[in-house]
Amino acid sequence: MFKYLNKQIMAFKDMFKDDNDVNEKNVIGFLSFAVMVIFAAADLITGYLGKDLVVQEFIYNSFVIITLGCFGIAGIEKFAKK
């Protein structure tokens, strides 16, 4: 069990190295998109129950900007090689 946990912790630390296979921009973009989807689902559920889900507009807009920025930069890097 200890070896498994140690392996998982090492894999997590490898993600932050300069030389890795994980595109960090895609990870952050996906997490930001997931937060927006959760917000939309919560808004639909609370609307169905007759309550109003109050979230500041600038918070939602910041997640939109993060998502578009991360996926946009990752897309440009894919087509515009060094």
Image: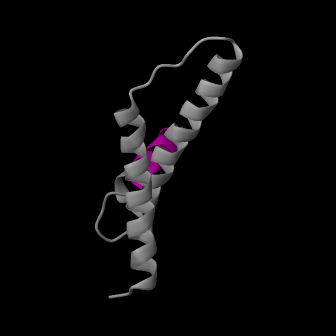
- The image quarter in which residue 63 lies: top left
- Among all residues in the image, which is located at the extreme left? 18
Residue 37 x/y as whole percent: 58, 39
- The image quarter in which residue 70 lies: bottom left
- Among all residues in the image, which is located at the extreme right? 48
Q: Nearer the viewer, residue 2 or 42?
A: 42
Residue 79 x/y as whole percent: 45, 83
Left or right placement of residue 43 versus residue 26 in this view: right
- Mark count: 0
Tell me the quadrant of the picture where the N terminus can be found.
top right
**Where are the magenta residues, as a range?**
1-12
- Among all residues in the image, which is located at the extreme top? 50
**In the rendered image, the vertical position of residue 35 relative to residue 49, given as above or below:** below
Left or right placement of residue 51 versus residue 12 in this view: right
Q: Is residue 71 magenta?
A: no
Q: Nearer the viewer, residue 31 or 69?
A: 69
Residue 47 x/y as whole percent: 65, 19
**In the rendered image, the vertical position of residue 8 relative to residue 17, given as above or below:** above
Left or right placement of residue 17 versus residue 64 in this view: left
Q: Residue at x 50, y 38 (%)?
A: 35
Residue 17 x/y as whole percent: 30, 62
